[in-house]
Image (spheres, grey):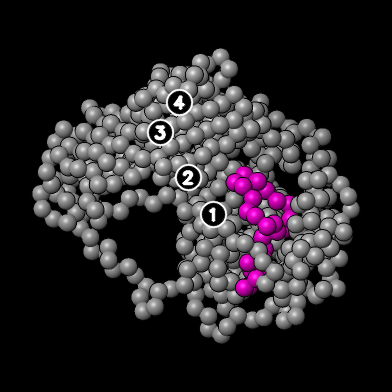
Amino acid sequence: MLRRLRVLAATLLPRGRPGRTRLVAAAAATLLTGTFAVGAGIAAAPPAQAAARTVDGGRLDWGIKESFLTYLTGPIAQGEWTLLDGAATGFRFHSATGSYDPETGALTAAFGGGVRFTGHEENGTHRLDMTLRAFTVRIADGRGTLHADVAGRDRETGRMTTAGQAALAELDLGGLDMRGAAGPLALDGVPATLTAEGEEAFAGYYPAGTALDPVSLSVDLRAPAAGSDDDPEHSEKPADDGGERRAGGGTAAPRSEIVDGAVDWGVRRTFRDYVTGPVAQGSWRLGGGAEDGGALFRFGPAEGTYDARKQRLDADFAGTLHFTGERLDLRLSGVSVTVANGRGTLFADVAADVAADVAGDGDTAADTPLVTFPVERLRAGDGLVAVTEAPAKLTARGAKAFGGLYKAGTVMDPLSVAVALDADARLPALPDLGSDPSPSAEPTAPATKARAADEPEPAGSSSSSPAVPLGVGAAAVPAAALLAYAVVRRRRTAAALAARTPAPAHTPPSATEATDDAGNPGATD
């Protein structure tokens, strides 16, 4: 039945470019399948007094505004953006926390990560300087708002101001019934409009009411544990005193064995973009226990030693990372970290064939020092020794490993190391991107049908199909499908017209569709 509904959706649409037809067909198919699932009962009400659920993991994808990014990195602003706190390429923000009430549909979801935009540099100061972090989506009574902590420079006075949880954008939910969700909840391509507070956050570059990039999110919902809201197991865990005592009590030996550990490193954001971009057209694979944390890769578990007296750390980490693409084959394994004399070094066994002019005979260069990073002091706490987001620079041998794409001394992604000296110690969690809800012909709740495709879209992709009400009658389906087509057509037409109009100096264009990535691995971070 689901397949027949999708075929019907495709027959309702005019022929056009494959990408457009696929996008609109997905939106129409969602309308059809949603109507089939709830049409008979018109979105049955949730059970009485349904228990509130905790938001436990998930992601937010929001491209801010494509034309703003194009302006930022263009010849006028000559700026860049920097991802913060584990945010991933494509402006994906992670580790959702919050609450959801299935009885009313109210949702509060806060996400980790942030981004800083800088441009118009004059005498070492950026006239455009804006940081957004701690994004929060709040939905109640059919209305949605996107909030964030904002730090920005006033365009006229040059003064830096801050605002906590400023309402940046209004979210048009299109009458979507958010009640009754039990599993992962997703919203795709929700239209966003700049608020008055958002206008201030953007230093007046755009007026309130400006259309921003659509917002997509996916969050996991967890039912409260019966009889308890807390996890008492670790609530009273004592901290140790800078490496002199273990978390469980007793004096730690000067030299301790490492029982577990992880090193988190994203290599370099622009390198990841280059690998998957139009030049290399490649990908990466993880093995041996390595994990993908969105904006970073985690290697572990670990073994080795820590000497508190000598301030020395020697740790070996499991896991492999293999980048492949056009004229690109780079494999990292045998990762290790050494910290001594206030400096850390990350080593790896490297097998590389990065470019045609680089010899790649399949040999592996063992224990290649890739990056170095500063360490003020190693201290143990709660059974852990950790270095968090240390700035990393490429070594000379690391530059050779990357085939000369980067010079020695190039700033790479920050590096974090955590090793456990106690079996009960908890390693820092990876950014939690949540799970992906899978649409079905019989969804458990209308809210779970907001996704307009069979599979989640990758980070950085955006959909022009808005979230739509699903409790509509079958007679409204053809009109709704045609409306979805009209929305997409109108947006693309408006963007094309706006792109022909040059923007005045020092003012970002309003709807440019051009991209800012020429496929250069050394593009701005």
Residue 463 included in the magenta stretch of the image: yes
Asked if the residue at tag 1 contacts the one at tag 3, i.e. Cβ–Cβ closer than 8 Å, the answer is no
Tag 3, which secondary structure? Answer: strand
Which mark identifies residue 333?
Answer: 3
Report if the CB atoms under discs 3 and 4 are less than 8 Å apart.
yes
* Viewer-proximal residue among 86 and 497: 86
Tag 2–tag 3 contact (CB < 8 Å): no
| Of residues 345 and 494, the one drawn nearer to the viewer in this rendering | 345
In the image, residue 296 lies at what x, y percent?
46, 41
Dot in front, 4 or 2? 4
The residue beneath circle 4 is 351
Mark nearer the N terminus (4 vs 2): 2
Residue name at image x 51 percent, y 39 percent: 285
Q: CA distance from mark 2 to mark 3?
A: 15 Å
| Residue hosting label 1 | 59
Q: Residues within 10 Å of mark 3 (few under 14, many from 20)?
A: many
> In the image as oriented, which residue stretches furthest toward the bottom?
48
* Residue under pointer 2: 292
> Is residue 210 toward the left or the right of residue 183 in the image?
right
Q: Residues within 10 Å of mark 1 (few under 14, many from 20)?
A: many
Q: Main secondary structure of the magenta part?
A: loop
Residue type of the residue flagged with mark 2: Asp
Give the SS element for disc 4: strand
- Dot 4, how many residues are within 10 Å of its Cα: few (below 14), some (14-19), or many (20+)? many
Q: How many marks?
A: 4
Q: Position of residue 156 (x, y in %)?
A: 59, 37
Q: Which residues are magenta?
A: 443-466
Nearer-N-terminus badge (2/3): 2
Would residue 142 appear left or right of 498 to someone viewing this image?
left
Q: Amino acid at mark 1?
A: Arg
Residue 455, image quadrant: bottom right
Question: Badge 2, how many Cα within 10 Å: few under 14, some, many 20+?
Answer: some
